[in-house]
Image: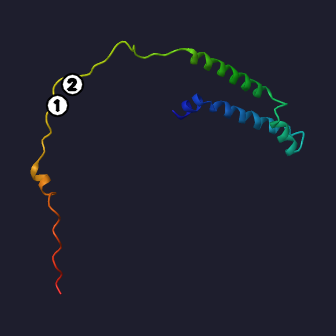
Amino acid sequence: MAVALACSVGLHWSFLQSLAWTTMLVDNLTTTSFAAALQRTLDGKHPCALCKAIAKGRKSEKKSDTLFSLKKFQALNPAVALFVRPLAPFPPIQTQESFFAAFEHAPPTPPPRAA
């Protein structure tokens, strides 16, 4: 259920993008220093094939969301009114007077202490 929720929110794109950046960083570290490799990885000017596929997937997903938002969904016809009535009248609530009578008086005071 957690995976389905994560995919519906779009976390799969973040996971794939992190994977792509990690792969690019490892590839860039073979030729340059860490600072230069990190800058080249995250500057956006040198995307890898996976980065391009992720960008294309995000764009296509956004386009499909706009198509669904244009549709109007109506669950019930507003011209039809629903009336719900109980099948039988509810019985009156029976209370036991002896149970509640114990709570009507103040609690007894404690007995005096023996000296």
Give the tally of numbered discs.
Answer: 2
Q: Who is closer to the viewer here, 65 or 51? A: 65
Task: Sort mark 2 into few (<14), some (14-19) or many (20+) by Cα contacts within 10 Å.
Answer: few
Is the residue marked by circle 1 packed among few (<14), some (14-19), or many (20+) residues within 10 Å? few
Of the numbered discs in the image, which one, if any, rests on residue 114?
none
Q: Quadrant of residue 111?
A: bottom left
Q: Nearer the viewer, residue 8 or 75?
A: 75
Please report contact status of discs 1 and 2: CB closer than 8 Å, yes or no: yes
Q: Amino acid at mark 2?
A: Pro
- Find residue 23 and report its horizontal and vertical position in percent: 77, 35
The residue identified by callout 1 is 90
- Residue, disc 2: 86
Would you identify the image quadrant in which residue 32 lies?
Answer: top right
**Residue 43 x, y percent position in the rendering:** 83, 35
Give above or below for 56 relative to 20. Answer: above
Spatial CA distance of label 1 from label 2 is 8 Å
Q: Secondary structure at mark 1?
A: loop
x 57%, y 15%: residue: 70
Q: Residue furthest bottom?
A: 115
Asked if residue 58 is positioned above or below residue 27 in the image, the reply reads: above
Q: Nearer the viewer, residue 8 or 27?
A: 8
* Quadrant in the picture for the C terminus: bottom left
Does dot 2 land on a helix, a strand or a loop?
loop
Q: Is residue 10 left or right of residue 97?
A: right
Using the rendered view, name the quadrant where residue 4 is placed. top right
- Residue 102, x across and y down, in percent: 13, 57
Residue at image location 53% in from the left, 35% down from the top = 2
Mark yes or no: residue 29 visible. no
Q: Position of residue 98 (x, y in %)?
A: 9, 52
Q: Residue farthest to the left?
A: 98
Q: Residue at x 18, y 23 (%)?
A: 87
